[in-house]
Amino acid sequence: MELELELEMVMVDANCIAHVLSEDAGIRERLQAALGGLVEEMRVWDSPLGFLESCDSLRPGILILDHFMLQMSGLELYEKIRERRCVFATILILTEPRIDVAVNAVQMGTVDVLCLPLERECFQQALKQARNRLEEMQRELLLLPPILPEGRSYLSLLTRRETQVVELVCDGATNREISAELGICKKTVERHRSNAMKKMRVNSVARLTRLVDRERQQRHFRRPRVMERFRSVSGYR
């Protein structure tokens, strides 16, 4: 299994870091060689669990991710990364064609799915797409309101009930689910949600979620996923 290494120079963002993750030493070496000269900085990982433990503290970048691993599959890791809302534009690597995996990966939001051996043009295009996706994700972060001075937080501006609603919204809960979880009517949920978003100076759930995670990271604390507990107990979907 040989990788096509004769790549034209497709320089990603000058400040971009690319992470290569595979349990297989041969695949790591080949991917590392393929990326040589295309990114300013590269980091190689041999453990999905090790990457997961560190990803909260890593700056945004491109992730070249092997799917077939023993600790967990590439898609399982990608789902956990998404739950933590870490910013990585991800290219999934397969060692054999698997249409079902490729379809699931694209639906979950990966940039591209490539099968070994890599084709030069496909790899170049995937890197360009990853660069563009990463820039979009970083622009979204820049649209968040500024960090408040003196250790203050936007979450501290909310009432207790507004905070509960925001936490559940960020977990992906619908207004109906929040109403059932908190024992309040749907209109009350909508009012708390609207008031909270005004106080936090955001106009979309995506920005609300990013802002909450930014503040939690500043406190070195990541919120629990409340709705996972709620759905497992109630069977709510």
Image (cartoon, helix red, strand yellow):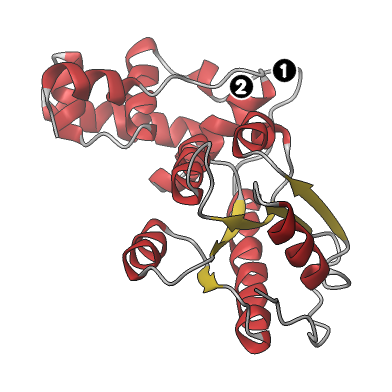
Q: Element under label 2? A: loop
Picture quarter with the C terminus: top left
How many tags in the picture?
2
Does residue 107 appear in this view?
A: yes
Q: Is residue 225 above or below residue 22?
A: above
**Residue at 50%, 47% in the rendered image:** 78
**Residue at 68%, 24% in the rendered image:** 218
Which residue position holds label 2?
153
| Residue 9 place in picture, x, y as percent | 83, 83
Picture quarter with the N terminus: bottom right
**Residue at 43%, 19% in the rendered image:** 224
Per the rendering, the mark at residue 151 is 1
Foreground of the two, 136 or 8: 8
Amino acid type, callout 2: Ser
Do the residues bearing badges 2 and 1 touch, measured as CB atoms within 8 Å?
A: yes
Foreground of the two, 83 or 221: 83
